[in-house]
Amino acid sequence: MAFVLPQFPVGQVTMPNMPVALRVFEPRYLNLMGELMGSTSPQFGIPLYSQAVEPGEAPNVLTVGTLIRVSDIGMRDDFVSVTGMGRSRYVVTKWLEPGPYPRAEVEFLPELVWDERFDSVALRVELEVRNLLSRASRFGELPWDTDAEISDDRVEALWQLAGMLPIDARESHNLLAAESLEELCEDVLAVCEAGQRFLDRVERESESD
């Protein structure tokens, strides 16, 4: 039986075990939050790509999203504030009629399972991500501090480190779609290496000005 999940595309990617804070003001999503306020287990999905096909059709691009467990919904003067936490990953298999808010049938992806052989690689991932954040912070304020705390759970920590990277949504979507721990670690390290090369160019250009 297909699992139907409300969808809230916000133009960004949320990694598992990363916090979410949203301001909701569009009528269709206010309708969604109104329904969730009466739920004992409020949740919705954040996909990067919104519906681009007719209702009932499969997406024309791979659309991976993250289930958001809502922790608080608060009323403000001109918007509704929503906080929650990213949990399981899913793939959109079919978009449904969008009214009164976007909905889709989804299949949840298998959870990544820790393997001790990744101990040294995971340590390298953390060092590389924190080093990139430290260097990038010289050029502007970032959402995450270099010394931001991460989970003691190794898999959760890897997702959090991936979510801290200062990259665009498409790159984050590629990371979110990782099929294994090995792929996730390799992809995060590749992003860090590319980020360091980019900062090298920025520094050279600034020195030549």
Image: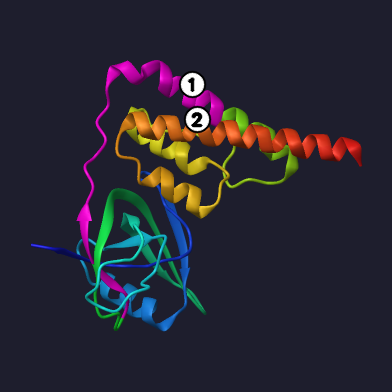
Q: Residue at x 67, y 33 (%)?
A: 197
Q: CA distance from mark 1 to mark 2?
A: 8 Å
Please identify the quadrant where the N terminus is shown: bottom left
Residue 44 placement (x, y as % from top left): 30, 63
Q: Residue at x 47, y 43 (%)?
A: 163
Which of the two discs, 1 and 2, labels the residue nearer the N terminus?
1
Residue 152 placement (x, y as % from top left): 36, 28
Q: What residue is disc 2 on?
A: 189
Q: Is residue 133 visible?
A: no
Magenta stretch, residue numbers: 101-129
* Residue in the foreground of this view, choosing between 154 and 70: 154
Task: Tell me if mark 1 has few (under 14), some (14-19) or many (20+) residues whose alpha carbon lies within 10 angstroms of its own.
Answer: some
Q: What residue is disc 1 on?
A: 124
Labels 1 and 2 touching (C-beta < 8 A)? yes
Identify residue type, mark 2: Leu
Please identify the quadrant where the C terminus is shown: top right
Q: Residue furthest right?
A: 209
* Residue in the foreground of this view, choosing between 23 and 57: 57
Examine the image and state in which quarter residue 73 appears.
bottom left
**Magenta segment includes 104:** yes
